Image (cartoon, rainbow, N blue to C red):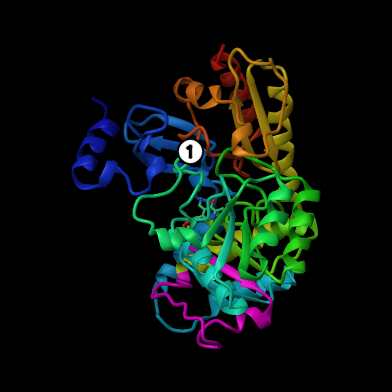
Amino acid sequence: MNESSKLFERALRVTPGGVHSPVRSFAAVGGRPLFIESAHGAQLTDADGARYTDYCMAFGPLILGHGDADVAAAAHDAINNGWSFGTAERWSLELAELITARIPWAEQIRFVNSGTEAVMSALRLARAATGRPLIVKFAGCYHGHSDAMLIEAGSGMAGIPASAGVSTATAAETLILPLNDIAAVTNAFADHGDRIAAVIIEPLPANNGLLPQTDAYLHELARLCRQHAALLIFDEVISGFRCGFGGRAEQLGIEPDLVTWGKIIGGGFPVGAFAGSKSLMQCIAPAGPVYQAGTLSANPVAMRAGLATLEKLTDGLLYDNLNLLSGELRAGLKQIPNVSVTVHDSLFWLHLHPNGAGNIIDVPRAPDQIRPEHAAAYPQFFRGILNAGIYLPPSPYEVGFISAAHSSDNIRDFIAAIKNTHPS
Ligand code: PMP
């Protein structure tokens, strides 16, 4: 038994499923998870000394790669000066100023510790600001693990209707609609319009495979929200600062009422945030009556790591280089049968269609458009790629991430590994 397996056996005794977040367990791909000991640039090294080129990148935060020197220096400097004050401090102010200066409709921001917290708080704010009870959510979109959002949620719950433990009363206040279906939204507003507080969507759904929505769909969604005085919440926990600094909102030219961020905003440390117009954000305590708090919120180590990361992202060239790499991946995969790829900026999702329609690159836009053979073929594919020294997300429904630490050589090796492994 190798060292990772021994550690996993020990972990199973003290932790449910041996992991502290479900998708890490390899339940979706079979076998035991790798225990990672260190990571540098685009490389992971496991407890047995094996090295892998990483395309999971901690599920998205590490856009600069592992152990970026500037982020490390900022975090070390923060630690040398005490790492939690429970007081006001300057770093969260600087991060807030950096973001609000570049994303003008995000006039005010509140930092929290995770994407889950950001969404949970934004929903509370939406209900308070509108005085309405219902939230519209889309099947396959994941918004963290607060009760109201654990219904048809994607990510580790892809294909599972709802988590156990969510009360019927809570579930009844979340309306689930299909993605890519504007008529469903129109009908929901016709039926419940004056009771809908907010519509929450990942403007680039990336938790049930990558399911890009058309610009026209998202603009119409925004229009319907305005028409019915419901708030539009863009959950940009994945797409924020990845699809350009201003995320999908900026790409689309849509100003959501509220945005939720996570992942990149903390440079790989635990940070989330929600932001919006000053008038909405003034509802949050202590300025207003919507309570929201956190002992470790705006922790100085995480704030400085986030600042160091976002400062680098103000250079648009970084995004151009990432897009060159994802373009190389897309071009390379065109030649390979039975594997398609959906790419958006530096996000990608491989979908497998053994015995299928060759190398046609189709773009599923809703979970039911994903070929059923994909999930069945993924475990074997994942293991083949892993054996070639490449770490993909250990789930058929999680997306892959390219970082600034990846190179064209990495992408070339990745394409070669896919060619050798592709399902037939
Ligand atoms: N929203 C989206 C779109 C996400 O992808 C995630 C996490 N994958 C979350 C919210 C929850 O974030 P966290 O895991 O930091 O709680």
Looking at the rendering, in which quadrant would you find the C terminus?
top right
Query: Any magenta on residue 278?
Result: yes
Q: Is residue 301 in view?
A: yes
* Mark 1 lies on residue: 159
Horizontal and vertical percent position of residue 395:
47, 34
What is the magenta range? 271-300
The number of callouts visible is 1
| Vertical side of 75 occupied by 403: above or below | above
Q: How far across and down, in percent of the image, does residue 79 sit?
A: 41, 68
Residue at x-position 36% and y-position 31%: 49
Which quarter of the figure is the N terminus placed in?
Answer: top left
Whole-percent x, y for residue 342 in the image? 68, 34
Q: Relative to residue 399, is residue 350 depicted above or below?
A: above
Magenta stretch, overall SS: loop
Quarter of the image for residue 417 reads: top right
**Looking at this view, is 76 or 221 the one in front?**
221
State which quadrant residue 358 falls in.
top right
Looking at the picture, tell me which residue is in the foreground, 411 or 354: 354
Residue in the picture at 59% in, 63% down: 260
Look at 74% across and 38% down and name the residue there.
324
In the orientation shown, which residue stands out farthest toward the front?
191
* Residue 245 in sight in this render: no
From the viewer's side, name the closer residue of 173 and 15.
173
Q: Secondary structure at mark 1?
A: loop
> In the image, what residue type sits under mark 1?
Gly
In magenta stretch: residue 371: no
- At label 1, counting other C-alpha atoms closer than 10 Å, the crowd grade (few under 14, some 14-19, many 20 or more) is some
Q: Residue at x 73, y 68 (%)?
A: 228
Q: Is residue 224 rendered to the left or right of residue 377?
A: right
How far across and how far down the image is residue 149, in percent? 49, 57
